[in-house]
Image: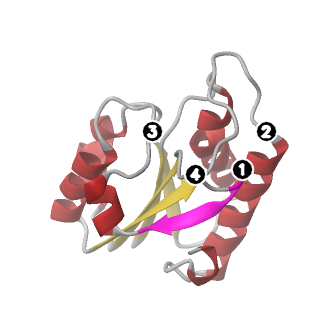
Amino acid sequence: MNRLVITVGNEMMGDDGAGPLLARLLEKNPIPGWEVIDGGTMPENYFHQVQDMKPKLVVVVDACEMDLEVGSIRLVSERDIAQEFFLTTHRLPLSFFISFLKELVPDVFFVGIQPAAVSFGAPVSSAVKEAVKRVYETLKTGKPDFPHLT
């Protein structure tokens, strides 16, 4: 196994469910060469699995506030992650999570999806559902750099 998707999010919190939605899509319709871990709200709990899997590439997908149009997808740079210009709803800052992953994996990419609403009991918006499908289709191409999403 050389490629892994780690999704982050809480499906009970509206558009924050983008990550888990992608995980379910990948579990139901696997893409050859890709494995998936649904990290939920505490993806750091899966570091041991990542270490055991020894992937060469990890793509982390999460809904995050980036001041973009709802459903926008962005490949977020390591510099932007370090500056934490966007907000997430998770306990461990993504900059720490990505830093830890980079100690285990040669290539780590973070893909952010712009949410509309993150509130308890809200459904995932149609724009975010479409964004999840676009991320899935990009994974199917086998191109890990997500060139058309930046």
Q: Amino acid at mark 4?
A: Asp
Tell me which residue sits at (62%, 62%) in the image: 73
Residue 75 on the magenta segment: yes
Q: Is residue 52 visible?
A: no
Residue at left offset 50%, top offset 78%: 144
Q: Which residue does the numbered mark 1 point to in the structure image?
A: 70
Q: Earlier in the sequence, mark 1 or mark 3?
A: 1
Q: Secondary structure at mark 4?
A: loop
Marks 4/1: CA distance?
9 Å
Q: Tag 2: Cα neighbours inside 10 Å, few (<14), some, or many (≥20)?
A: many
Is 117 positioned to the left or the right of 49 in the image? right
Q: Which amino acid does the dot numbered 3 rest on?
A: Thr
- Tell me the mark number nearer the camera, choosing from 2 and 1: 1
Q: Is residue 150 visible?
A: yes
On the image, numbered disc 2 is attached to which residue? 125
Q: Is residue 114 magenta?
A: no
Task: Give the residue pinned by disc 3.
Answer: 88
Looking at the rendered structure, the kind of residue marked 1 is Val
The colour scheme applied to this rendered structure is secondary structure
Q: In whole angstroms, how far apart are the C-alphas of marks 2 and 4?
A: 16 Å
Q: Which residue occupies 22% across, 47% down?
A: 96
Q: Residue beneath label 4, please?
A: 67
Please name the amino acid that badge 2 sits on: Ser
- Residue 90 in percent (x, y) is at 39, 32
| Mark sitting earlier along the chain (2/4) | 4
| Classed neighbour count for the residue bearing mark 3: other residues with Cα under 10 Å, few (<14), some (14–19), many (≥20) | some
> What residue range appears in magenta?
69-76
Q: CA distance from mark 3 to mark 4?
A: 12 Å
Secondary structure of the residue carrying tag 2 is loop
